Image (cartoon, helix red, strand yellow):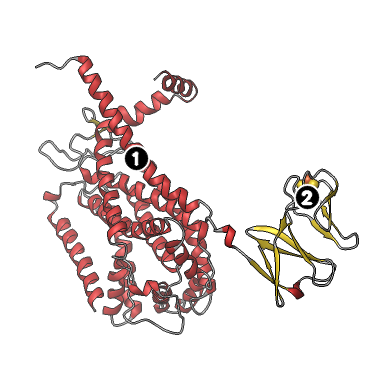
Amino acid sequence: MDIKADDINRRRVLLGTLLGGLGAVLAAAGVYPVWRFLAPPATDEALDQVTLFRDQVPLGGAHFFNFRGRPAVIIQMRPGDFTAFSAVCTHLGCVVQWQAAEQRFLCPCHAGLFSADGAVIGGPPPRPLERLAVSLRDDRILVG
Amino acid sequence: MSLRKFIVDWLDLRLGVRDLVEQNLTRYLLPRNINIWYSLGAVLLTLFGLQFLTGFLLLIYYVPDTTQAFASVKHITNEVPYGWLIRNTHAVGSNLIVVVLLLHMLSALFMSAYKKPRELTWLFGFILFNLTLALCLTGYLLPWSQLSFWATTVATEAPGAIPVVGEHVVRFLRGGAMVGEATLGRFFALHVMGLPLLFALMLGLHLFCVRRAGISRPPFGRDYRPAPKRHSFEHEYHPGGIPFFPNYAVKEGAVVCFFLALLAVLVFFAPNLFIPPAAFEPANPFVTPERIKPEWYFLWAYQTLKIFPSEAMGLAVQGAAMTFLALLPFIDRFSERRPARRPLFVGCFVLGILLFIGLSLWGHWS
Ligand code: FES
């Protein structure tokens, strides 16, 4: 029996496809663990609460802390009146500063200004600062 | 297909890749009777590549600090997704590398590939062997477990037996009187940066020598003739041989796959084969665990130290044995390479292997 040229060709294509497929499967088996290893851990964010103490927040001042991996800020305007915000500016994501003398937030990047209750009072930011839920329990403050 | 041709044409015009491929792969001929022992170099290259990759990944989460190292390794193994895979591949891989390295050296010895004109290839290879052992030793400390701590204490203690300067050598190795933060710092730096850089350099030289001199003909078969004496450099060609690519490369690929499969079996089914229980307790400088032993490939040295009446003598014997091995091509200058015609050499070869195995077992059971 003689083997025709296009017969050989077909076998080549078949072999090539099989090898290619096998290679792809093996490559995926190698890449997937590496990708998972490198991927940052997925946190169950909704459940994360941050506990602060009342005396950490000065009256008329601000306290910065880490909330779900991002900077956040809590201020106490009147005794016992705590308000928390995400400290990330709604313009391009810089972190705002608290200006105690003017009682407002300044974003240093493009001079965005926010009032003590998070509203935009100047500069480019399109939205007010994101507000975070605050609840009080004895001498502790729960955020989130 | 046309895209591929386009890319190859583009590269060919600029770098002459077709010519490179022909010279180094398809028209690069190897001796007809080449055997699978010659593929162990490729296996090592693959395994070292894997060590580099997994080591680099581990570096992302590992913390080189005595208070955090153990926890960070535990975190990698137990919490980081697939961390167990990366870590075990790195740890088991290092053991497999030593096995393949020993086989690679034994095959080069048995077939006398180290002989003139390949003395430098052997010497660079021997340095690579020592660098590998140094990498194993420095890597052993990093998890900061009881095993790491005490194995390193024992290993760095050994040079203390050298007369006069011993104490200083020990202090220098440890960066202090005891194994501690300073030791971890320097071993970490050596393991991830210093030794790998040196290793890469030596590997480059080793491969350059191999490629430059040409593959040595296996000294077997009826038509084998010892090479005539040469007085000037000559690349060893093998007219009528088999092409490196695809013929030998496929064979090499098969052997590489075999060792990768072996690695996978160990990683998945016996990851703790080489890892004693003391590796799972954090280091405690105040409690020495019982029966602390070095890794299997250092057992022979450990046992030699115990046999000789004085440690200095044991060290001297070890040093002499290693120096002899390093300089073998300069000592053994006969051009005969056929094992059948070198009974004395083959006798020493077999005895050497038995001695290594015997000392290791003795060290293990004692
Ligand atoms: S990022 Fe805050 S004002 Fe531009």
**Which residue is at 26% across, 26% downward?**
A14
Q: Amino acid at mark 2?
A: Pro
Left or right: residue B160 compared with residue B347: right
Above or below B345: residue B354: below
Left or right: residue A64 compared with residue A10: right
User: Which residue in the structure is indicated by mark 1?
Assistant: A25
Instruction: Place residue A142 in its image quadrant.
Output: bottom right
B129 vs B264, nearest the viewer: B264
What number is the disc on residue A47? none
B361 vs A90, nearest the viewer: A90
Instruction: Place residue A115 in its image quadrant.
Output: bottom right
**Which residue is at 32% across, 44% downward?**
B42
Q: Chain of mark 1?
A: A
Q: Amino acid at mark 1?
A: Val
User: Which residue in the structure is indicated by mark 2?
Assistant: A128
Label 1 close to label 2 by CB (< 8 Å): no
How many numbered markers are drawn?
A: 2
Q: Is mark 2 within 8 Å of ligand 1?
A: no
Image quadrant for the N terminus of chain B? top left
Image quadrant for the C terminus of chain B? bottom left
Res. B321 visible in picture: yes
Q: Report x, y in % for residue A29.
A: 37, 45
Q: Chain of mark 2?
A: A
